[in-house]
């Protein structure tokens, strides 16, 4: 749980957690986003909906599904909320990608009108986008899809020796719409495959030890879950989720306004691959950052970073087309390792190195600084005894302690 209001920070772990609190999406905004996409789901599946008979189901994907949403760097910037609208009874033999896209679009337009939204839904390459013009400032991207179990199994045949894994992943695979796909206009044509639920499941498996501890703790508190998979992502806060939030903030600041900035899905994937169940944010960052840097340095040409939920998909496929994307990722992961480790391995808990402060933004650091405890005042005073006492407090506080936040 978050530290009580007014509690002073006395360790680096507490300082990192305070930074994560500042950059995370406010709980009220998180709930508003979930309320909104549930509202869209209810609209799409209402009896009067033109796609009601096809069994539309709305689910979150991306950072909302993974629990790694952060605030935009700029106050006026928008949150991107990604959801999937999968038609349980949809079939590529009965509809083209274009027909699916337009069928969902009819209802999305109707929803926008019923909600008196000021902007028309945008017909983007793969999804429909709704713009919410209020204090929360959301972009809601709604990706249409249909079940693609058979196509997934066919495409993975001979690609993966693990038949059991292919079978498990195929259960959540979907075919998605894409205007630039050659089969977009034709029934029976191949579709692009995606697997956001499969990816979220893989991400949980990478954290299964700490999540199982959370499940047992929650059951003891009266919130019974039989399996880790049953726990909603927003109910648990793990060291890996928090570390990824900090890495994404570092990326956003370093590449503010750059369209070729490192993409979140690659950051999340290689961070999760490197994670070994560490119980603190500090230990997680110390472990994963050197591994992430080596992972990128050792990539061949072309670079391949496979989607764990659909290994035929290469998250780095655009790196060959735009070399700046690869160079930027290499620069970023090297800088991130230097900036975070300069704080974690050198500085006192209440002294942020300048590059680290710049990466988190001065505004964020200012909000955390007043909580830095008596030791900060001691060090500022500059007496030998005060400094010795401050260092003792830091040493005691930095002892590794298992933790897992449950909100």
Image (cartoon, rainbow, N blue to C red):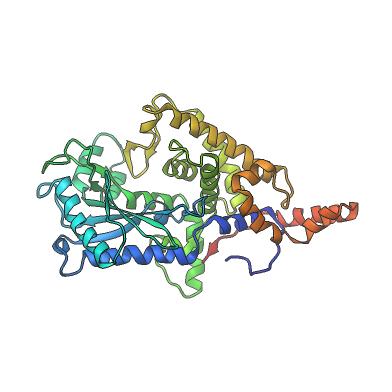
Q: Nearer the viewer, residue 185 or 76?
A: 76
Can you see residue 215?
no
Where is residue 343? Give x, y as percent.
68, 45
Task: From this view, report whether residue 4 is shown above or below residue 318.
Answer: below
- Between 4 and 396, the one lying in front of the other is 4
- Is 33 left, or right, of 123 in this rendering? right
Residue that extends furthest to the front in the rendered view of this protein? 118
Image quadrant where one finds the N terminus: bottom right
The answer to which image quadrant residue 49 occupies is bottom left
Residue found 37% across the figure and 32% down from its top: 318
Please count the marks in the image. Answer: 0
Q: Which residue lies furthest to the bottom in this view?
A: 222
Above/below status of 294 relative to 34: above
Q: In front: 370, or 389?
A: 370
Q: In this view, does 369 lie to the left or right of 204?
A: right
Asked if 197 appears above or below 325 in the picture, the reply is: below
Q: Where is residue 229 in the image (x, y as percent from the top left)?
A: 39, 60
Residue displayed at 60% across by 53% down: 280
Q: Is residue 202 left or right of residue 12?
A: left
Q: Position of residue 4 (x, y in %)?
A: 64, 69
Q: Seen from this angle, which residue lies furthest top? A: 301
Q: Where is residue 386 shown, x and y percent of the image?
A: 86, 56
Q: Which of 216 and 140 is in front in this view?
A: 140
Q: Which residue lies furthest to the right in this view?
A: 384
Residue located at (57% from left, 37% from top)? 290
Where on the picture, by quarter, is residue 373? Answer: bottom right
Q: Quadrant of residue 153?
A: top left
The answer to whether one can see residue 355 in this image is yes
Q: Along the horizontal axis of the image, is 150 left or right of 23?
A: left
């Amino acid at each position: 749980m978050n530290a009580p209001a007014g509690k002073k920070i006395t360790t680096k772990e507490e300082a990192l957690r305070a930074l994560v609190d500042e950059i995370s999406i406010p709980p009220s905004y998180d709930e508003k986003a979930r309320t909104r996409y549930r509202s869209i789901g209810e609209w799409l599946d209402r009896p009067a909906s033109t796609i009601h008979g096809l069994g539309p189901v709305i689910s979150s994907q991306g950072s909302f599904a993974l629990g790694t949403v952060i605030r935009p760097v700029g106050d006026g910037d928008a949150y991107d909320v990604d959801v999937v609208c999968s038609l349980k009874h949809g079939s590529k033999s009965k509809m083209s990608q274009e027909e699916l896209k337009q069928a969902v679009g009819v209802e999305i337009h109707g929803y926008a009108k019923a909600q008196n939204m000021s902007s028309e839904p945008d017909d983007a390459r793969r999804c429909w986008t709704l713009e919410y013009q209020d204090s929360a400032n959301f972009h809601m991207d709604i990706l249409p899809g249909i079940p693609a179990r058979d196509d997934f199994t066919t495409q993975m045949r001979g690609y993966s020796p693990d038949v059991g894994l292919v079978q498990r992943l195929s259960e959540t695979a979907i075919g998605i719409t894409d205007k630039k796909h050659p089969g977009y206009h034709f029934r029976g044509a191949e579709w692009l495959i995606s697997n956001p639920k499969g990816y979220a499941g893989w991400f949980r498996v990478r954290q299964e030890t700490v999540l199982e501890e959370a499940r047992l703790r929650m059951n003891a508190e009266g919130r019974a879950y039989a399996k880790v998979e049953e726990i909603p992502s927003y109910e648990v806060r793990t060291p890996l989720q928090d570390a990824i939030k900090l890495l994404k903030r570092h990326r956003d600041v370093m590449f503010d306004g750059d369209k070729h900035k490192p993409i979140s899905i690659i950051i999340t994937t290689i961070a999760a691959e490197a994670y070994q169940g560490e119980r603190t944010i500090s230990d997680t960052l110390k472990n994963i950052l050197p591994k992430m840097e080596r992972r990128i340095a050792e990539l061949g040409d072309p670079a391949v970073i496979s989607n764990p939920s659909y290994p035929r998909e290469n998250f780095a496929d655009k790196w060959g087309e735009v070399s700046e994307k690869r160079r930027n990722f290499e620069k970023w992961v090297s800088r991130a390792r230097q900036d975070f480790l300069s704080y974690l391995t050198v500085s006192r808990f209440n002294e942020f190195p300048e590059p680290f402060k710049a990466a988190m933004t001065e505004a964020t650091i200012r909000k955390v600084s007043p909580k830095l405890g008596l030791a900060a005042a001691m060090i500022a005073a500059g007496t030998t005894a005060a400094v010795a006492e401050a260092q003792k407090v830091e040493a005691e506080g930095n002892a590794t302690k298992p933790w897992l936040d449950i909100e």
